[in-house]
């Protein structure tokens, strides 16, 4: 966990994804960057939450990069990070930011433009 | 807030101050803002908060060897660079020399979804990174309140702000925080709650269509400070705060004297004219010859080879030159010879403060020995008398400090008492001349008084002030039982006096002759009387002689009778002669 740049966590190939699910955004790949600050409780929770979220809703269609701003402070400036944790959705547009420990899954879904799932 | 007070008490040393490097502000604050602590600068939009904050950093970075970090929440770094280029601040150069770090913090509310607990560690990390990479001693947060519109979680924000200020104090950086003024509070979101050490309030008031910026130190914990509202201005060199009291009464007092350009006026002023470096005020109603007197002074100064700066708020340069030619003063030669410079500007162009600064700058650029301000009353109209007084006293102080002789004219309104001027400016003036219109016998003539002249003997009498084709002439006025007469009244009165004197002479002559005549008459009378007495005496003597003759004849007759009778005894009749006496 010390090296938070967890790289991409791709699941499956493009071919495998097609037709797997019935939803509209299924075709798109989501690219996320999560900015955290070391091992603070919020950060740890955020990492856990986003991982769980991606596993559940975006299985195989997401890329997640975790950046520790303590380690790369210039990244905070570069990406306009003020609040931590911040999750930045890079693709698909529009750009969207989520701050907080990502415990509100419904807000995350709404913010990502995904149908609300029970 | 309480802990701040607590951690300050044990330190007996006074608050260490961090000079801002901003002209005048350090004097008002008694040395600068508290070092290592946050200072809040608040005010309405457009009152100069950002500039003040940025200048604090730029001065620190370029002049005081203290690198700085500028965190902007409103303007992008590129925009800041552009904005400040116009003030001659090359921010990019400072950034490349690593004495300044710019960081633009952008929070787009619409892009943000809050999904749980968060803190502002990103801000801290960025700040810490910027501070550490430049070795910054100064930090500006402009305007941190933007955070409140970026995040809805107020409680988290406030806790984070508190943590932020603690963090900045721990970093031992002197921080300037700007805040937009709220309707009833100093700042819209109550930032003053966190920044309790020093609060500076800026405002930008428009009175009579002229805007003036002012600065006030609302609070400065642990230090005395100027409590007034100090005007300040923003020009091409940044901010200048102009504390009235900044220049103490310490200026030198030269004993050299310089001519006023009018020899009889010099004579009235103890024979030698004004003190060098003093301030001269000439008041008078319209058309009393104030500018002419000023032109004489300028002409005399230029003749001595001194440099002269003429601020004209009424007439254009060419107009002055033309008009002064009519009284035989050729100012153009000095203008061509670069001894004289005109500075013409409309008084309503900007407020007093701006005028003051433009005068300062012109003076600094030209380095004159003599400054003429014609007329200062026009500046007064651009503001209220109190401000005008403070402005003028600062101007005079400034000129005195530089040992520049100031010659100011002041147009008074006819019919109004002099006190108007007196309250306004005369107290800062060393010499005060009054040009007055003396009306009588259908004409207006000018009179010149010296109302005061510090440190020298001076005439207490009025002189008639005549404008002739070869300059100003001072004449003695006619003082007589008919009062003070000037102009043709004086000339007529003088003629009348001469006639009267002649008449008196003639009178005396006539009287003398009369006495002579009387004397002659008297003498004739005496002669006549003497003659009369003599005649009478002669008559008397004749009578006595006749009497004596008769008595003798009588005696002779008696004797001859006795002889005839052969009387034995001849009667010895006595013969008594009658004497004349």
Image (cartoon, coloured by chain):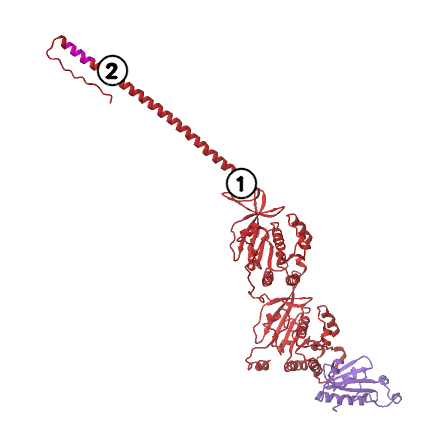
Chain colours: A purple, B red
- Residue B182 in view of the camera: no
Q: Is the C terminus of chain A in the top left, top right, bottom left or bottom right quadrant?
A: bottom right
For disc 1, the chain is: B
Image coordinates for residue A43, horizontal then vertical, percent: 72, 87
Badge number at residue B494: 1
Same chain check for tags 2 and 1:
yes
Mark 1 surroundings: few (<14), some (14-19) or many (≥20) residues within 10 A? some
Residue B173, compared with residue B214, is above or below; it is: below
Mark 2 surroundings: few (<14), some (14-19) or many (≥20) residues within 10 A? few
Q: Residue furthest left?
A: B568
Badge number at residue A39: none
For marks 2 and 1, give the one nearer the viewer. 2
Sooner in the amino-acid sequence: mark 2 or mark 1: 1
Image coordinates for residue B245, horizontal then vertical, percent: 57, 66
Image coordinates for residue B346, horizontal then vertical, percent: 67, 57
Residue B216, compared with residue A74, is above or below; it is: above
Residue B385, compared with residue B564, is above or below; it is: below
Q: Is residue B226 magenta?
A: no
Main secondary structure found in the magenta portion: helix
Badge number at residue B546: 2
């Amino acid at each position: 966990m010390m090296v938070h740049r967890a790289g991409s966590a791709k699941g499956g190939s493009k071919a495998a994804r097609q037709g797997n699910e019935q939803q509209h955004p299924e075709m798109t790949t989501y690219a996320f960057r999560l900015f955290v600050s070391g091992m603070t409780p919020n950060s740890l929770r955020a990492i856990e939450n986003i991982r769980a979220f991606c596993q559940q809703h975006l299985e195989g269609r997401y890329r997640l990069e975790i950046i520790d701003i303590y380690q790369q402070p210039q990244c905070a400036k570069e990406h306009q990070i003020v609040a931590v944790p911040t999750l930045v959705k890079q693709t698909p547009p529009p750009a969207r930011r989520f701050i907080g420990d990502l415990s509100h899954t419904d807000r995350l879904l709404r913010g990502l433009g995904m149908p609300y799932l029970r | 807030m309480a802990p701040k007070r607590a951690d300050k008490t044990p330190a007996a040393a006074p608050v260490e101050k961090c000079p801002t490097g901003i002209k005048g502000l350090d004097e008002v604050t008694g040395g600068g803002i508290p070092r290592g602590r946050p200072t809040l600068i608040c005010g309405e939009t457009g009152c100069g908060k950002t500039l003040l904050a940025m200048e604090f950093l730029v001065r620190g970075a370029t002049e005081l060897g203290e690198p700085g970090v500028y965190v902007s929440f409103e303007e992008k770094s590129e925009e800041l660079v552009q904005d400040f280029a116009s003030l001659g601040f090359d921010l990019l150069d400072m950034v490349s020399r690593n004495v300044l770090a710019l960081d633009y913090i952008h929070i787009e509310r619409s892009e943000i979804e809050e999904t749980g607990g968060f803190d502002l560690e990103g801000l801290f990390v960025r700040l810490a990174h910027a501070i550490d990479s430049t070795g910054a001693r100064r930090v500006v947060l402009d305007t941190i309140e933007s955070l409140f519109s970026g995040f809805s979680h107020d409680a988290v924000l406030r806790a984070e702000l508190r943590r932020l200020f603690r963090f900045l104090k721990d970093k031992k950086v002197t921080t300037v925080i700007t805040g937009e003024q709220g309707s009833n509070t100093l700042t819209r979101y109550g930032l003053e709650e966190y920044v309790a050490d020093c609060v500076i309030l800026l405002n930008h008031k428009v009175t009579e269509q002229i805007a003036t910026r002012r600065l006030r130190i609302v609070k400065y914990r642990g230090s005395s400070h100027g409590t007034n509202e100090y005007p300040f201005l923003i020009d091409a060199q940044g901010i200048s705060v102009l504390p009235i009291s900044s220049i103490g009464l310490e200026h030198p007092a030269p004993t050299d004297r310089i001519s006023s350009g009018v020899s009889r006026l010099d004579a009235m002023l103890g024979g030698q004219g004004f003190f060098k470096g003093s301030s001269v005020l000439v008041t008078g109603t319209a058309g009393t010859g104030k500018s002419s007197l000023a032109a004489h002074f300028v002409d005399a100064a230029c003749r001595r080879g001194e440099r002269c700066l003429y601020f004209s708020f009424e007439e254009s340069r060419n107009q002055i030159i033309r008009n002064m030619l009519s009284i035989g003063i050729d100012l153009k030669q000095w203008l061509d010879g670069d001894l004289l410079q005109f500075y013409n500007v409309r008084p309503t162009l900007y407020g007093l403060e701006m005028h003051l600064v433009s005068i300062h700058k012109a003076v600094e650029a030209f380095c004159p020995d003599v400054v003429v301000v014609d007329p200062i009353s026009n500046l007064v109209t651009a503001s209220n008398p109190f401000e005008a007084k403070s402005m003028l006293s600062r101007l005079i102080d400034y000129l005195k400090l530089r040992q520049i002789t100031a010659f100011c004219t002041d147009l008074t309104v006819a019919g109004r008492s002099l006190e108007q001027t007196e309250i306004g400016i005369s107290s800062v003036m060393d010499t005060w001349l009054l040009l007055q219109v003396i009306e009588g016998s259908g004409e207006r003539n000018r009179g010149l008084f010296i109302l005061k002249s510090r440190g020298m003997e001076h005439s207490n009498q009025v002189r008639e002030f005549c404008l002739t084709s070869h300059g100003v002439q001072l004449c003695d006025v006619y003082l007589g039982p008919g009062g003070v007469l000037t102009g043709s009244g004086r000339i007529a009165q003088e003629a009348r006096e001469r006639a009267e004197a002649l008449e008196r002479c003639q009178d005396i002559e006539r009287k003398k002759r009369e006495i002579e005549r009387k004397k002659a008459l008297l003498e004739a009378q005496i002669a006549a009387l003497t003659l009369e007495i003599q005649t009478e005496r002669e008559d008397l003597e004749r009578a006595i002689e006749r009497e004596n003759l008769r008595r003798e004849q009588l005696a002779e007759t008696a004797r001859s009778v006795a002889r005839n009778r052969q009387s034995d005894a001849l009667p010895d009749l006595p013969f008594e002669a009658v004497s004349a006496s």
